[in-house]
């Protein structure tokens, strides 16, 4: 994320891995699966894609089993035929995860030591059925689905990533929100021993990293709790073992390594809004018509790219998911609620 002092975040040539890294064959990702709830789904975007070249993860046996039992049907919204999956090396090598440093290569270099087993998540606040849940117990009632989503960072780069996970809505429903619950607040682990970025005297973030969604956003069928990507466990740098993916919002909403999910009455103050409220809001819906105060949001650099092939494309309203989510914001001024 860019804060006040502009830093060069452009992808360097050396960061880019050739596209040949992916797409041999492990699993056939067949036609489309309906997400239900009126989603307009397009044709098979990546039929034939597979992840044979993606290294095996070191996740627990239960997670490997769940991945094997995944609904191997890519669920992608309309007009995704033009999307090309980012090579795994880009998706796992060019990251934002400030707990491990602010450089794009820092998370891949430093997050390996994060201990992700055992892992538990506290669900609390306005719920009748809260508590501390082992990740396995949180995941076990739901079946994994593969979702191929665009990830559009507020810094104006983007990638297309195949996630594995469960709808957040299922987890929230099981927690039985009370009638007072209006928002969902998420927190990342705090452990300066394991997370060097949390030891840095220069860090702008008041740890833990916090994010939030309105309850209807959290319950939307596109909103995913991811535990894997590219047919395997999440790499630590991508937010293992549990992260949020909200594809119509800027990437900073997709909080990593979640340890707490709280149903709350008041709108949570998310980390980037706390740091620079005039630059980063609560909603953070991808919107090519509302620029960041210091740069345009009309276009984005789709990774992989290079100096000679910047791969600049137009940014789409709600990151291309308008058919699915625009109604959530009917009547709202998205310029005020950025
Ligand atoms: N979550 C935590 N805990 N800490 C972070 O620094 N960065 C966010 C988001 N989630 C971040 C985080 C930002 S700015 C982006 S763009 C995405 O993670 C990047 O996800 P990726 O590295 O998997 O592409």
Image: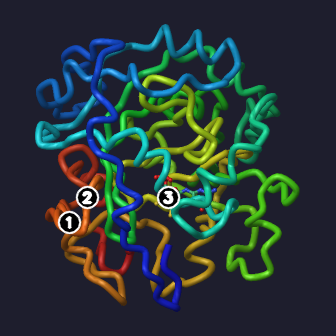
Q: Which label was assigned to residue 253?
A: 3
Question: Where is residue 82 shown, x and y percent of the image?
Answer: 12, 42
**For this view, does 305 lie left or right of residue 68?**
left
Q: Which residue is mark 2?
A: 305
Residues at discs 3 and 1 in contact (Cβ within 8 Å) = no
Question: Where is residue 332 shown, x and y percent of the image?
Answer: 30, 69
> Split into 4 quadrants, where in the image is the C terminus?
bottom left
Name the quadrant containing residue 64.
top right
At horizontal 25% and vertical 52% (from top left) the residue drawn is 327
Mark 3 or mark 1, whichever is nearer to me: 1
Residues at discs 2 and 1 in contact (Cβ within 8 Å) = yes
| Mark 3 or mark 1: whose residue is earlier in sequence | 3
CA gap, disc 3 to disc 2? 24 Å
Residue 46, relative to residue 20: is it above or below?
A: above
Q: Which residue is mark 1?
A: 310
Residue 295, relative to residue 332: is it above or below?
A: below
How would you rate the neighbour count of disc 1 (Cα within 10 Å): few for under 14, some for 14-19, many for 20 or more?
Answer: some
SS at mark 2? loop
How would you rate the neighbour count of disc 2 (Cα within 10 Å): few for under 14, some for 14-19, many for 20 or more?
Answer: many
CA gap, disc 2 to disc 1? 5 Å
| Mark 2 or mark 1: whose residue is earlier in sequence | 2
Mark 3 or mark 2, whichever is nearer to me: 2
């Amino acid at each position: 994320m860019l804060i006040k002092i502009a830093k060069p975040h452009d992808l360097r040539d050396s960061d880019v891995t050739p596209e040949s890294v992916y797409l041999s064959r492990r699993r056939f990702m067949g036609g489309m699966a309906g997400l239900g709830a009126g989603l307009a789904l397009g044709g098979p975007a990546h039929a034939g894609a597979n992840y044979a070249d993606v290294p095996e993860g070191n996740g627990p046996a239960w997670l490997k089993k769940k991945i094997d039992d995944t609904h191997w049907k890519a669920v992608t919204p309309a007009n995704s035929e033009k999307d090309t999956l980012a090579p795994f090396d880009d998706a796992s090598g060019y990251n934002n995860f400030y707990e491990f440093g602010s450089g794009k290569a820092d998370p891949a270099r430093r997050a390996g030591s994060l201990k992700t087993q055992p892992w538990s998540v506290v669900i609390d606040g306005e719920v009748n059925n809260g508590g501390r849940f082992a990740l396995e117990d949180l995941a076990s009632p739901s079946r994994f689905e593969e979702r191929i989503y665009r990830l559009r960072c507020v810094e104006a780069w983007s990638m297309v990533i195949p996630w594995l996970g469960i709808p957040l809505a299922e987890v929230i429903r099981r927690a039985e929100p009370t009638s007072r619950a209006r928002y969902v607040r998420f927190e990342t682990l705090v452990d300066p021993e394991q997370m060097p970025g949390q030891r840095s005297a220069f860090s702008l973030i008041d740890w833990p990293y916090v994010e939030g969604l309105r309850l209807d956003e959290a319950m939307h069928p596109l909103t995913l709790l991811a535990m894997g990507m590219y047919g395997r466990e999440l790499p630590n740098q991508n937010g293992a073992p549990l992260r949020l993916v909200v594809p119509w919002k800027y990437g900073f909403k997709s909080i990593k390594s979640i340890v707490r999910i709280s149903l709350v009455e008041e709108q949570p103050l998310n980390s980037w809004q706390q740091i620079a409220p005039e630059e980063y809001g609560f909603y953070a819906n991808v919107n090519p018509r509302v620029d960041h105060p210091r740069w345009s949001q009309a276009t984005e650099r789709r990774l992989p790219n290079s100096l000679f092939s910047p791969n600049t494309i137009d940014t789409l309203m709600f990151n291309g998911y308008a058919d699915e989510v625009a109604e959530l914001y009917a009547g709202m001024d998205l310029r005020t609620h950025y």
